[in-house]
């Protein structure tokens, strides 16, 4: 799904979830969508691939990243402890966008990255706050390309939202 208006038309309640996250944490809806698009392509149960020994014996996954936002276990636990949202699930869109908003606010508070800066927010999201401070992304040219793509997608989503946000806010869109 590459059109924000179509995404919200198809998935009832998602706009309200993303809008609630924006109101709570200040990370704009288009930045949330761009990060989810990059991390999972809007797949609720996305996971890293299973690793195999001798192409037959499963040895586990590359990481514990799971769900729409591809959040690792330890980071998800940090979110739950920080927010008190003990019922949150990584495969629930509302919880995933709340997490992205929370993490984006943490990135703003810790690293002074604008909540509207999809490029640097994504680098901090991918590398973690410590990795961002150490600029580990500079040793990963592929990640710089991905962050540029996230920025481009965020801009595209923002432009699309301008054409349908009034209807989304009114609830008219879904009827």
Image (cartoon, helix red, strand yellow):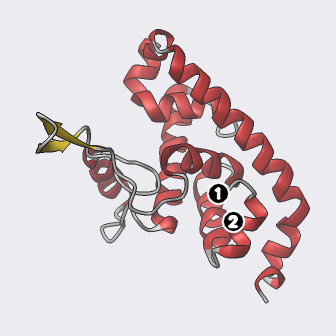
Query: Residue at 76% of width from left, 84% of height from top?
Result: 174
| Mark 2: few/some/many CA within 10 Å (<14, 14-19, 20+) | some
Asked which quadrant contains residue 13, the reply is bottom right
What secondary structure is found at the residue carrying circle 1?
helix
Is residue 23 toward the left or the right of residue 132 in the image? right
Asked which quadrant contains residue 117, the reply is top right
Frontmost residue, 135 versus 79? 135
Quarter containing the N terminus: bottom right
Q: Which residue is mark 2?
A: 7
The spot of residue 119 in percent (x, y) is 64, 29
- The mark that comes first in sequence, 1 or 2, is 2
Q: Are marks 1 and 2 in contact (CB under 8 Å)?
A: no
Query: Residue at 32% of width from left, 71% of height from top?
Result: 87
Is residue 77 toward the left or the right of residue 120 in the image? left
Q: CA distance from mark 1 to mark 2?
A: 17 Å
Q: Find the residue positioned furthest to the top.
A: 139
Q: Which mark is residue 54?
A: none
The spot of residue 31 in percent (x, y) is 66, 46
The spot of residue 132 in percent (x, y) is 46, 21
Q: Is residue 89 above or below residue 66?
A: below
| Mark 1: few/some/many CA within 10 Å (<14, 14-19, 20+) | many
Q: Which residue is mark 1?
A: 22
Answer whether residue 94 is visible to the viewer in this image: yes
Answer whether residue 26 is visible to the viewer in this image: no
Query: Residue at 66% of width from left, 27% of height from top?
Result: 148
Frontmost residue, 58 versus 10? 58
Q: Find the residue positioned furthest to the bottom.
A: 175
Query: Residue at 72% of width from left, 43% of height from top?
Result: 154
């Amino acid at each position: 799904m590459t059109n924000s208006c179509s995404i919200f038309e198809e998935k009832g309640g998602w706009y309200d979830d993303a809008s609630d996250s924006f109101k709570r944490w200040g990370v704009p809806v288009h930045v949330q969508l761009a990060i989810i698009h990059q991390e999972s392509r809007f797949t609720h149960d996305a996971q890293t691939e299973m690793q195999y020994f001798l192409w037959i014996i499963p040895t586990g996954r590359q990481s514990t990243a799971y769900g729409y936002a591809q959040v690792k276990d330890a980071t998800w636990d940090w979110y739950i402890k920080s927010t008190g949202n003990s019922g949150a699930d990584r495969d629930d869109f509302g919880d995933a966008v709340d997490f992205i908003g929370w993490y984006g606010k943490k990135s703003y508070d810790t690293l002074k990255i604008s909540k509207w800066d999809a490029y640097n927010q994504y680098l901090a999201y991918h590398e973690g706050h410590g990795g961002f401070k150490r600029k580990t992304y500079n040793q990963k040219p592929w990640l710089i390309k991905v962050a540029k793509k996230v920025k481009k997608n965020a801009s595209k989503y923002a432009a699309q939202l301008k054409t349908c946000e009034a209807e989304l806010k009114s609830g008219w869109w879904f009827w």
